[in-house]
């Protein structure tokens, strides 16, 4: 039993610390995705009050959800650079998880729009400590030959948690209130917030016990941490890592348009919140199924073909959502977006990891994670603002972003793998 984590890691052909970190992120992902579904419902309830400054409810929801992404993304370059400077990843992850646990619990006491804004903002800062350090740790535990597979496994487990949350969140809220000993009760909303807090604490414990920083991280601390926008080689206009960051921003924005407009989607398709939760989770389902095999495939066939193909697939799968009239077709479209995202995300991180020098993983890879976070913020805010111009307007906007991203990747990013090799069979020696 003591070597169980090692045997499981061997089955996935990854470092046991990568697998442990993946399980930890799966736990906190459940809690964070709970909130994406619960917060819009909470804002629309009679519990929350206070001034809205004349804004419509959809816009208030968009601001609350987007603030998380804006602050998360804004602080990621800072925390990523600091983790490089100090040559440590684990302390940054623990600080972030501790903050996430406290803020998840704080929702229980929030009764105004302003308090929700403050709590969600603090959560964004907390997660900014987690993401760059986690991705950098995975990158440093991998090699060029297996980096895509390691990124794929890490993202798969993280997204299992993120995908499970939306499906369960609506049920947890709707089944409340819950009876407790001594005739006490808690509402469905409070139960959801407690679940989110517990998952963050569990994640913190897993990282504390199972994660250690590699020796090379500290040895290479303080390397050149400059961020390039123009291509230093002169072959292209833009630096490839910066280009991948811009493409990640556009991809995330196109995908996140869906989150803010739950009432409008349900009205357009004449469906309930359960269907919306399934549609939201469809993107995650595709990611869960495909991240690991695509990650390993890009170690064999190269990074660029998957990234370009995924950005191209994102164009039609985003556009059709503005014109779909059935719940089943919307589920299929979101599933298609998930396939596109899986083709882009792990290969992009692997390609950026190939280009990042020793001791600068936090700084360089934070460009992609920062951009993805900004996209998650821009998407809900954009759909909240554009939905008034018609149901199709947000999705047309997302289609334009996806098209621009595909053009940038195709023209500015080159392959990093010089040779291919056989992909290891799972469980083989």
Image (tube, rainbow, N blue to C red):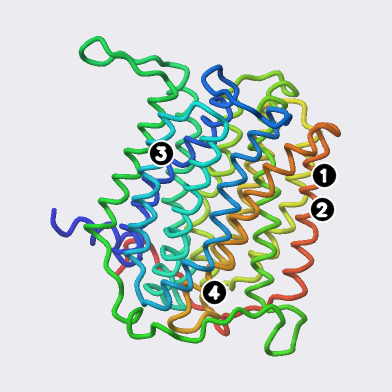
| Dot 4 or dot 1, earlier in sequence | 4
Disc 4 packing (10 Å; few <14; some 14–19; many ≥20): many
Q: Are marks 3 and 1 in contact (CB under 8 Å)?
A: no
Query: In which quadrant is the C terminus drawn?
Result: bottom left
From the viewer's perspective, is the residue at label 4 or at label 2 nearer? Answer: 4
Disc 2 packing (10 Å; few <14; some 14–19; many ≥20): some
- The answer to whether 380 appears left or right of 400 in the picture is left
Disc 1 packing (10 Å; few <14; some 14–19; many ≥20): many
Numbered badge on residue 364: 4
* Residue for point 69% across, 75% down: 413
* Residue for point 71% across, 18% down: 270
Q: CA distance from mark 4 to mark 1?
A: 31 Å
- The answer to whether 297 appears left or right of 341 in the picture is left
What residue is disc 1 on?
396
In the rendered view, would you say 56 is above or below 211? above
Closer to us: 89 or 24: 89
Location of residue 217 in the rendering, given as x and y in whole percent from the top left corner: 35, 78
From the viewer's perspective, is the residue at label 4 or at label 1 nearer? Answer: 4
Task: Give the secondary structure at mark 2.
Answer: helix
Numbered badge on residue 300: none
What residue is disc 3 on?
104
What residue is disc 2 on?
400
| Dot 3 or dot 4, earlier in sequence | 3
| Dot 3 or dot 2, earlier in sequence | 3
Location of residue 335 in the rendering, given as x and y in whole percent from the top left corner: 62, 42
Q: Are marks 1 and 2 in contact (CB under 8 Å)?
A: yes
């Amino acid at each position: 039993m003591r070597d169980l984590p090692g045997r499981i890691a061997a089955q996935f052909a990854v470092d046991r610390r990568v697998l442990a970190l993946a399980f930890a992120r799966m736990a906190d992902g459940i809690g964070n995705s709970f909130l994406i579904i619960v917060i819009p419902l909470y804002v629309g309830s009679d519990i929350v009050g206070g001034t809205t400054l004349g804004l419509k409810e959809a816009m208030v929801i968009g601001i609350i959800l987007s603030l998380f992404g804006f602050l998360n993304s804004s602080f990621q370059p800072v925390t990523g650079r600091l983790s490089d400077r100090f040559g440590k990843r684990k302390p940054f992850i623990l600080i972030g998880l501790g903050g996430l646990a406290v803020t998840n619990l704080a929702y229980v006491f929030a009764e105004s729009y302003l308090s929700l804004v403050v709590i969600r903002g603090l959560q964004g800062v907390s997660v900014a400590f987690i993401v760059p350090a986690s991705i950098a740790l995975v990158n440093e535990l991998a090699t060029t030959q297996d980096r895509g597979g390691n990124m794929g496994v890490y993202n798969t487990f993280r997204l299992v948690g993120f995908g499970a949350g939306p499906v369960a969140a609506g049920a947890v809220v709707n089944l409340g209130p819950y009876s407790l000993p001594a005739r006490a009760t808690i509402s469905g909303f409070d139960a959801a917030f407690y679940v989110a807090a517990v998952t963050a604490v569990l994640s913190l414990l897993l990282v504390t016990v199972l994660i250690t920083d590699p020796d090379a991280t500290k040895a290479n601390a303080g390397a050149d941490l400059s961020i390039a926008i123009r291509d230093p080689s002169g072959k292209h206009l833009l630096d490839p890592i910066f280009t991948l960051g811009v493409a990640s921003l556009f991809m995330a924005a196109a995908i996140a348009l869906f989150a803010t407009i739950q009432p409008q989607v349900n009205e357009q398709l004449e469906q309930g919140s359960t269907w919306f939760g399934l549609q939201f989770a469809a993107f995650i389902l595709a990611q869960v199924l495909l991240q690991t095999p695509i990650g390993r495939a890009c170690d064999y066939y190269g990074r660029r073909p998957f990234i370009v193909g995924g950005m191209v697939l994102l164009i039609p799968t985003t556009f059709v959502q503005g014109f779909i009239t059935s719940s089943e077709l919307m589920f299929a479209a979101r599933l298609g977006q998930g396939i596109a995202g899986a083709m882009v995300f792990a290969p992009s991180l692997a390609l950026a990891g190939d280009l990042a020098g020793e001791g600068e993983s936090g700084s360089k890879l934070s460009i992609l994670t920062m951009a993805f976070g900004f996209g998650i913020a821009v998407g809900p805010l954009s759909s909240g603002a554009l939905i008034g111009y018609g149901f199709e307007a947000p999705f047309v906007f997302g289609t334009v972003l996806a098209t621009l991203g595909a053009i940038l990747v195709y023209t500015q990013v080159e392959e990093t793998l010089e040779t291919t090799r056989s992909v290891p069979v799972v469980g083989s020696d």
